[in-house]
């Protein structure tokens, strides 16, 4: 199966200097990219770790509650344990959408400028 992608360039890539990296790091555009990432990732990380630790603490110290049967042999512990997996996948999906819509365009603009594309 043939692709339409051209072969990689044989010319050496000119890497940005340390001063150029520092200038970009101090730019408002990079600061906005960093804020956008942190305002999304940090609260979700704290929320998920809290949710995970709650599950662990309930499993260790709330035997009667976690052992409560909901239907058949399915109890609260099983439902909450499976919910851990579900929330992991939902957070990963949500982050990928956020990154594609908010982070990637900003990062690509910075990268292309650093590589001399603009």
Image: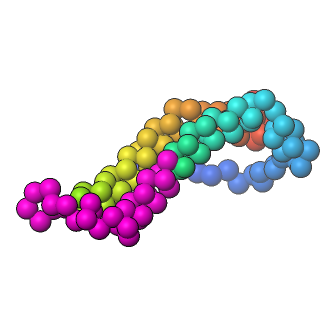
Q: Is residue 117 visible?
A: no
Please state the horizontal and vertical placement of residue 34, each as a whole percent of the image. 69, 39
Q: Is residue 13 left or right of residue 35?
A: right
Residue at 50% of width from left, 36% of height from top? 98
Quadrant location, the C terminus: top right
Toward the right, the furthest residue is 19
Question: Mostly what secondary structure, the magenta segment?
Answer: helix
Tell me, yes or no, whether the highlighted magenta stretch contains residue 50: yes
User: x, y (%) of residue 113?
Assistant: 75, 35
Colouring mode (rainbow / by chain / secondary structure / one colour) = rainbow
58 inside magenta stretch:
yes
Range of the magenta residues? 47-75
Residue 42 appears in the rendering: yes
Q: Is residue 109 above or below residue 71?
A: above
Which of the 4 image quarters holds residue 31? top right
Residue 95, position as x, y percentages in the image: 48, 43
Q: Residue at x 38, y 67 (%)?
A: 61
Residue 7 x %, y %: 58, 51
Count of marks, rendered view:
0
Work out whether residue 112 or residue 9 is closer to the camera in this orientation and state it.
112
Q: Is residue 75 left or right of residue 46?
A: left
Closer to the camera, 55 or 107? 55
Q: Is residue 97 left or right of residue 71?
A: right
Q: Nearer the viewer, residue 100 or 53?
A: 53
Left or right position of 18 against 108: right
Examine the image and state in which quarter residue 36 appears.
top right
Residue drawn at the location 59% of the way across and 45% of the way down: 42
Q: Residue at x 89, y 49 (%)?
A: 18
Furthest-left residue in view?
Answer: 72
């Amino acid at each position: 199966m043939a692709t339409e992608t051209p072969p990689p360039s044989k010319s050496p890539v000119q890497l940005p200097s340390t001063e150029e990296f520092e200038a970009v790091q101090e730019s408002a555009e990079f600061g906005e990219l960093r804020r956008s990432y942190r305002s999304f990732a940090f609260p979700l990380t704290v929320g998920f770790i809290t949710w995970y630790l709650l599950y662990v603490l309930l499993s260790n110290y709330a035997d009667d509650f976690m052992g409560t049967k909901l239907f058949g042999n399915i109890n609260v512990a099983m439902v909450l344990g499976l919910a851990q997996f579900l929330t992991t996948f939902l957070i990963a999906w949500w982050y990928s959408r956020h990154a594609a819509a908010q982070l990637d365009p900003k990062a690509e603009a910075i990268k292309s400028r650093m590589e001399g594309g603009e």
